[in-house]
Amino acid sequence: MVVPCLPMPQALKWSSFPIYSAISSNVCGRWNGLTGRYRVTKISCTSNDNGQRERIVQPTRKVVEHVCLLKANKDLSIDEEKDMLDYLYTSQYQMRGILAVSLGQISGQAKEEYTHAVFMRFPSKEELAKFYENPLYLKVLKEHVEPYCHGLMNVDYESDVEDDIIPIFRRGEEFNYGVEFVLLIAFVESAIGEPAEDALMSLQELTMECQSLIVQCTQGSNFTSSEEYTHAVVIRFRSCESLVMFFTYDCFNTLLLLTAMYGHACS
């Protein structure tokens, strides 16, 4: 299944990666031992009897999202693919600091020819930095990823999630099924700041209004060494049908058209 093309002007550089047949995991850990910063945000909720939107205040916690996109070799066999994904997936059991993992094959043919994606969640930037330098992870890359791939890109960003064990660790029935959707955006330098934040806030409000389709959405500014993309969004949809339905919303297409004013031409 391939997501329908969106009417995006050439003014914005962006890439989207629907990840079907994703493998998800809830990493067991000590809830009291999780460190991080709290913040209180206002989250859109429901409309009252007068048709006005009501907001509620909920505590949130900072998390760090790590997205790794892979370009697998064209001659990659089924056994080699399984070996690569299995080692990436089970790395969570060998290393501390990983809160959740989801990975799988990207649906369709992305422009950049990325074939697979790995999503990991960490409690802090410090834990992510330790992960990058972990000898076990470097060994997995050297022995079970690099032989099967000819390209790799990392995107990391800090975001907020509801301060509860289920959304933080991605536990529960809702996270056992579904589709991950990765959206990478490159804003021009003049738009970094308020214009970009306004566009992402509009996307966040839209996802809050579509809770029947979406399990969780995080977004933030890319702080990794890669300068290709400035911002990233990861949305966990409840099903493939939910993903397609979300893309048919006129308000979502309109949002992308408005966001395009702050982007730069596709390469």
Image (cartoon, rainbow, N blue to C red):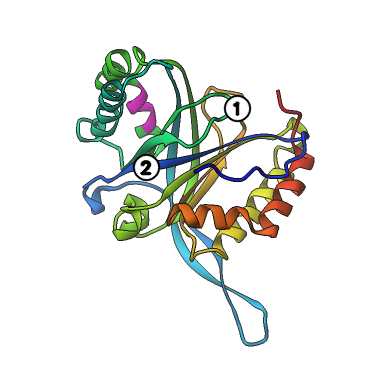
Q: Position of residue 172 (x, y in %)?
A: 29, 58
Q: Quadrant of the C terminus?
A: top right
Q: Which mark is residue 245?
A: none
Tell me the amino acid under the disc marked 2. Answer: Ser
Circle 2 residues within 10 Å: few <14, some 14–19, many ≥20: some
Q: Give the residues in magenta.
A: 128-132
Tell me if residue 193 is in the magenta stretch: no
In the image, residue 243 sits, relative to residue 58, either above or below, namely above
Would you identify the image quadrant in which residue 11 lies?
top right
Identified by mark 1, the residue type is Lys
Q: Is residue 209 left or right of residue 141?
A: right
Q: Mark number for residue 21?
A: 2
Residue closest to the eye, 74 or 187: 74
Q: Nearer the viewer, residue 240 or 89?
A: 240
Q: To which quarter of the image does residue 239 belong? A: bottom left
Towards the viewer: 217 or 99: 217
Mark 2 or mark 1, which has the lower sequence index? 2
In x, y percent, where is residue 169?
Answer: 32, 50
Q: Residue at x 33, y 20 (%)?
A: 133
Q: Tell me if 203 is positioned left or right of 142 in this view.
A: right
Badge 2 element: strand
The residue under the point 72% across, 27% down is 266
> Horizontally, is 77 left or right of 228 in the view?
left
Q: Position of residue 13 (x, y in %)?
A: 69, 32
Residue at 37%, 42% (x, y): give it. 21
Foreground residue among 101 and 3? 3
The secondary structure type at the circle numbered 1 is loop
Query: Does the magenta portion include 129?
Result: yes
- Residue at numbered disc 1: 111
3D distance between C-alphas at marks 2 and 1: 20 Å
Considering the whole magenta stretch, tell me its main secondary structure.
helix
Q: How many marks?
A: 2
